[in-house]
Image (cartoon, helix red, strand yellow):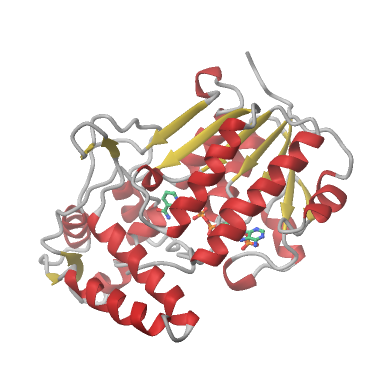
Amino acid sequence: MTAAGRRVCVLGATGTIGRAAVQALVRRGHDVVCFVRPRAGVGGSLSPQDSMALLGGTTIRFVDVTDPASLARDGFQGERFDAVLSCMASRTGTPKDAWAIDYQAHANLLAAARDAGVGHFVLLSAICVQKPLLAFQHAKLAFEKALIESGMTYSIVRPTAFFKSLSGQIARVRAGKPFLVFGDGTLTACKPIADADLGDYLAGCLDDESRWNRVLPIGGPGDAITPRQQGEFLFALLGRPPRFRHVPVALFDVIIATLGALGRVAPSFAAKAELARIGRYYATESMLVLDPATGRYDAAATPSTGTETLFDFYKAIAAGAAPPERGDHAVF
Ligand SMILES: NC(=O)c1ccc[n+]([C@@H]2O[C@H](COP(=O)([O-])OP(=O)(O)OC[C@H]3O[C@@H](n4cnc5c(N)ncnc54)[C@H](OP(=O)(O)O)[C@@H]3O)[C@@H](O)[C@H]2O)c1
């Protein structure tokens, strides 16, 4: 069946993947209404006019998603919608923000969406929730569970790593500095996915019935790659001899223990300790499907979509394209 021309409400439209999902929805002929904050973007850098320019071809409504009354009054406005697509997520990943946005704001949204007649909810989640050790992963899982149990048709998309999260060292390498890796640079691997490919996959959930009522791990095209391979490719691309600096994972343990102890006195240190835990997680866990039987990450079991590889992206930046906006919680 085709879902072209559906009325879709989008949350998180001003974020990295939200922007790409909006473009894909508009391209596919949907009627898109974005619920955004008056000050949006990294550090509130987007004015209302900036958001309107960014999200051309859509209707923009200014909504406070933390307030159920605002969702109904300013967002849905008593109108009917066919679907919700949410790429909304805490920008900081701290426990308080994660529970407020990744869980509670989504729970508010689900209730309001039901009142608006929404029949399908497409949720951008993350592949890392399959091994939940961090507050934001528990918050995401709690909402995934609420959505599944709601009875509404759902598509829960759990992508691997985004290009922006793997591009932070291009400037370092260009400046002649070594590429930083944890351990020997082969502790983890991922199948990176391009923003546009993921945006298209999310939008495609409305049309493709095989993605309904499913939890969908998804990566980009090609083989899984390690941080070491990313560094080697960058050095070759820039015509430099490879140079790596090895950072011990144990460094995180020291930082986490110190901030954790300070956090018992001052809460701001507890939030910083959680950010260090997030860093440690990504330094040691692969962004691939986890085989529950073996406890091993399995590249072959991780589905792929799209056409653009991380190395295509590195090549474009080396040729002069703008590097990505990396957001608030980048490690390197
Ligand atoms: N980075 C990775 O490699 C990776 C990999 C797999 C999965 N993921 C997951 O993918 C998701 C989205 O990632 P992304 O990079 O697209 O995120 P992002 O660029 O940080 O965008 C987050 C979006 O959520 C919105 N948001 C945050 N707090 C809000 C609030 N209080 N009220 C209203 N809107 C709020 C933001 O709006 P404003 O513009 O107003 O702030 C923005 O539109 C996250 O759940 C992340 O865990 C990430």
- For the image, the number of numbered tags is 0
Whether 268 is drawn above or below 99: the answer is below
Q: Name the image quarter holding residue 243.
A: bottom left
Percent coordinates x, y for residue 182 in the rendering: 18, 65
Left or right of 262 on screen, residue 66: right
Give the camera-side residue of 307 and 294: 294
Q: In which quarter of the image is the C terminus?
A: bottom left
Left or right of 313 on screen, residue 59: right
Give the camera-side residue of 311 and 211: 211
Q: Can residue 306 be seen in this view?
A: no
Q: Name the image quarter holding residue 5.
A: top right
Give the camera-side residue of 171 and 211: 211
Percent coordinates x, y for residue 28 in the rendering: 64, 30
- Residue at (15%, 59%) from the top-left corner? 185
Q: Assign ligand 1 to one image quadrant.
A: bottom right
- Residue at (37%, 47%) from the top-left corner? 128
Whether 119 is drawn above or below 318: the answer is above
- Residue at (56%, 58%) from the top-left corner? 99
Percent coordinates x, y for residue 313 in the rendering: 36, 51
Q: Name the image quarter holding residue 262.
A: bottom left
Percent coordinates x, y for residue 186 in the rendering: 14, 54
- Residue at (34%, 66%) from the top-left corner? 277
